[in-house]
Image (cartoon, rainbow, N blue to C red):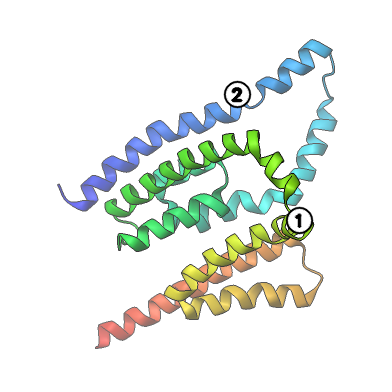
Amino acid sequence: MENNNYMETWKKSCVRIGSPTNILAAVTAFIPVIYLCTVYDCWPSAQLILSAWALTAIAFGAFYIVEPVSYYASLGMSGTYLSFLSGNIGNMRVPCASLALDVTESEAGTIQAEVVSTMAICGSIITNLIATTAAAFVGTAIVSVLPAVVTDGLKLYASAAIFGATFGNFALKKPKIAIFGILIPVVCKLIGTLPAWLTILLTVFGTVLIGRLFYVVESKKAAKA
């Protein structure tokens, strides 16, 4: 079978398994709330639910669009389903998948990349589960004996270090695009009046458009050569 045939079969299987699994997880997430509201008879009004959802959408609504689009190149289809089911996407799944693609020299969009990223993400989920379980038992005791400068550093800079390392990894591959990936949010920040969700959308899709422009230009140059 050719690569396209493998990909077609792979994607159909991913959708057939991944979609109902993620929907089931979303539905069952309401079980504890429904249980508590039933036992204690504390059902919120529809207006309160919609108001709470609106506040959440204002804060995180941009990620509904940004994350599936921006992470797909590294995660692939099956990896996207797995990542949104398990969480820790930006700080765990994407770095693991991108590193695995680099090590195996896999080209995004191929069946090899899909398999490699899926294996890397599955490994990270298992490792994450073991580490999280261990941290639940011994994490508090370890953190309590660390000096304040270390714990403060973990709280303030751990996420930034992870995302910075991920950005650096991709910047080494496409330095021209990386410049715009930094420049766009900096300009948005200097403007000072743009909401955070709009800055995120402009940064992600602006960088995607720049990358597409570079691709078209380079393709035309290659065709002429």
Secondary structure beneath disc 1?
loop
Q: Give the CA distance from mark 1 to mark 2.
A: 40 Å
Q: Which residue is outermost to the left?
A: 1
Question: Residue at label 1?
Answer: 147
Expressed as whole percent of the image width and height from the top left, the position of residue 152 reads 76, 57
Secondary structure beneath disc 2?
helix
Give the residue displayed 57% in from the left and 46% down from the top: 88
In screen coordinates, is 100 left or right of 186?
Answer: left
The foreground one among 217 and 175 is 175
Q: Which of pointers 1 and 2 lies earlier in the amino acid sequence?
A: 2
Give the residue displayed 51% in from the left and 33% down from the top: 22
Question: Residue at label 2?
Answer: 28
Give the residue displayed 47% in from the left and 73% down from the top: 211
Q: Which residue is outermost to the top?
A: 39
The foreground one among 183 and 148 is 148
In screen coordinates, is 210 left or right of 36?
Answer: left
Expressed as whole percent of the image width and height from the top left, the position of residue 207 reads 54, 71
The foreground one among 38 and 47 is 38
Q: Is 25 drawn above or below residue 196 in the view shown?
A: above
- Count residues near mark 2 (Cα–Cα under 10 Å), then give few for <14, some for 14-19, many for 20+: few
Tell me the amino acid under the disc marked 2.
Answer: Thr
Quadrant (top left/top right/bottom left/bottom right) for the C terminus: bottom left
Q: Quadrant of residue 194?
A: bottom right
Tell me the amino acid under the disc marked 1.
Answer: Pro
Expressed as whole percent of the image width and height from the top left, the position of residue 163 reads 59, 62
Foreground mark, 1 or 2, reads 1
Expressed as whole percent of the image width and height from the top left, the position of residue 197 reads 71, 59
